[in-house]
Amino acid sequence: MADSEMSEERKRVTCQLCDQLLTDARTLSCNHSFCYTCLVSHRATESKKHCPTCQDVSLQDVCDLDLLPSNREINEVVANIIRSTKTHR
């Protein structure tokens, strides 16, 4: 994979709350993805249930965040990036 392709892929799987590769990615109904722990923290500190990216009312109550399925596709891409990074060292 070319460096520019890897950079775009990395951008796609970076959490906009912590600016790190997504960890246990969860996707909201608006199709924005965040780390599970970032969503929990964001929900605990925000009074409204808004997606941090688009402000769509799609963020569920903290107890319901457990019901959001893990985004396997994104989690696999993150795992591939991590593997690729380790082999290029």
Image (tube, grey):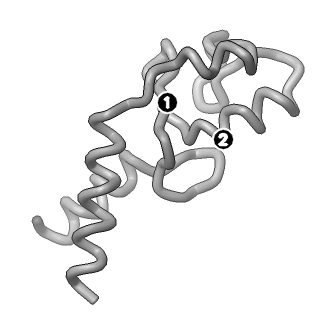
**For the residue marked with disc 1, what is the amino acid?**
Arg
Whether residue 24 sits left or right of residue 19 in the image: it is left
Q: Residue at x 27, y 36 (%)?
A: 73
- Residue 12 spot, x, y in % from top left: 36, 46
- In the image, which disc is placed on residue 61? none
| Above or below, 74 relative to 64 | below
- Residue 49 spot, x, y in % from top left: 75, 15
Residue indicated by mark 2: 37
**For the residue marked with disc 2, what is the amino acid?**
Thr
Disc 1 crowd rating (10 Å Cα; few below 14, some 14-19, many 20+) is many
Which quadrant, please, contains the C terminus? bottom left
Q: Are marks 1 and 2 in contact (CB under 8 Å)?
A: no
Return the residue found at the far left.
1
For label 2, the SS is: helix
Whether residue 29 sits left or right of residue 5 in the image: it is right
Q: Earlier in the sequence, mark 1 or mark 2?
A: 1
Q: Residue at x 59, y 36 (%)?
A: 36
Residue indicated by mark 1: 26
Q: Residue at x 56, y 15 (%)?
A: 67
